[in-house]
Image: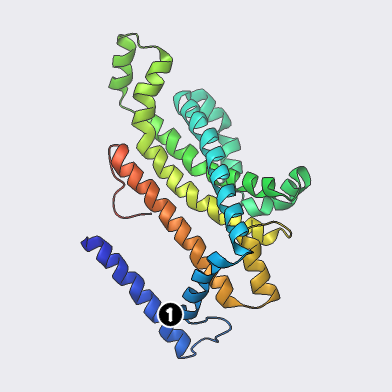
Amino acid sequence: MRVALRRLAGLAGFLVLWEVIARLHLLSGDVLPPVSTVLGRFFGLFGDAKFVPDAVSTLLSWAIALGIAVAIAVPLGVLLGSVRWLRLSVSPIVEFLRPLPAVALIPLVILVLGSGAQTKITLAAFASVWPVLFNTIYAVSEIDRQLLDTARVFRTPAVRRLFTVMLPSIAPFTMTGVRLSAAISLVVLVSTEYLTGGTIGIGQFVYVWGTSAGRMDMVLAAVVFIGLVGYLVNLALLGSQRRWLGWAASGGAV
């Protein structure tokens, strides 16, 4: 309860500071509208016939991209973490691909897949694979070898060892990677929507209101929505990690 109150106090202080800066005209109202105006626009978004389909498209694409990233990264991470020679063989490729900015690949992916939802989903999945993959590889290397040796002594089949020893042991680390990837996926999705014309989504909603209409109040209202979604998703994943995976991430939400 005390932690929640401190967080609310910090948020309230930030909102008050925002309102004061806007009301004192320290920045132009066209650049930074008052927070009271932005929040009014935020609640009005849910009745906006254009925003609702954009939000649904972004959130659905986010869920698909994150699911694809987890489906690829977890098995691959277990494999690379278990087979050292394979990990060493593919590490140069992984280290080359990992730092590539996903948005820089937009032209290439559009040429291959077109400019539909598949482009933003592919780029978001690509960007969000890496935290899950590296956390899983690290987790496999940190498994207590006595657990694995005991399972082998009792001649536990490999598939059963995977599901009863390895996956439960690495789950907390992998979930941390999923939490990081959830935020990365959302950022890449909205950025791709913003940069690729004709794509439905919150990114295009921001682009239209920001560049065509010059309405920063609508832009910031959409930004508040994106931030709130990211915060709630992280909170849900963190709560699941604490409740079902044996140990809590230290500190607050990342």
* Image: 187 above or below 34: above
Residue 46 vs residue 64, the one in the foreground: 46
Tag 1's secondary structure?
helix
> In which quadrant will I find the C terminus?
bottom left
Q: Amino acid at mark 1?
A: Trp
Q: Which residue is mark 1?
A: 18
- Locate residue 7 relative to residue 79 in the image: left or right: left
> In which quadrant will I find the N terminus?
bottom left
In the rendered image, the residue lying farthest to the left is 2
| Residue at horizontal 29 percent and vertical 21 percent from the top | 147
- Locate residue 141 relative to residue 226 in the image: left or right: left
Near mark 1 (Cα within 10 A), the count class, few <14, some 14-19 or many ≥20, is some
Quick check: can you spot residue 228? yes
| Residue at horizontal 42 percent and vertical 15 percent from the top | 158
Could you say where residue 222 lies in the image, as x and y percent from the top left? Answer: 55, 67
**Res 93 → quadrant:** top right
Could you say where residue 58 lies in the image, as x and y percent from the top left? Answer: 59, 54
* Image: 128 above or below 36: above
| Residue at horizontal 48 percent and vertical 25 percent from the top | 84
**Res 156 → quadrant:** top left
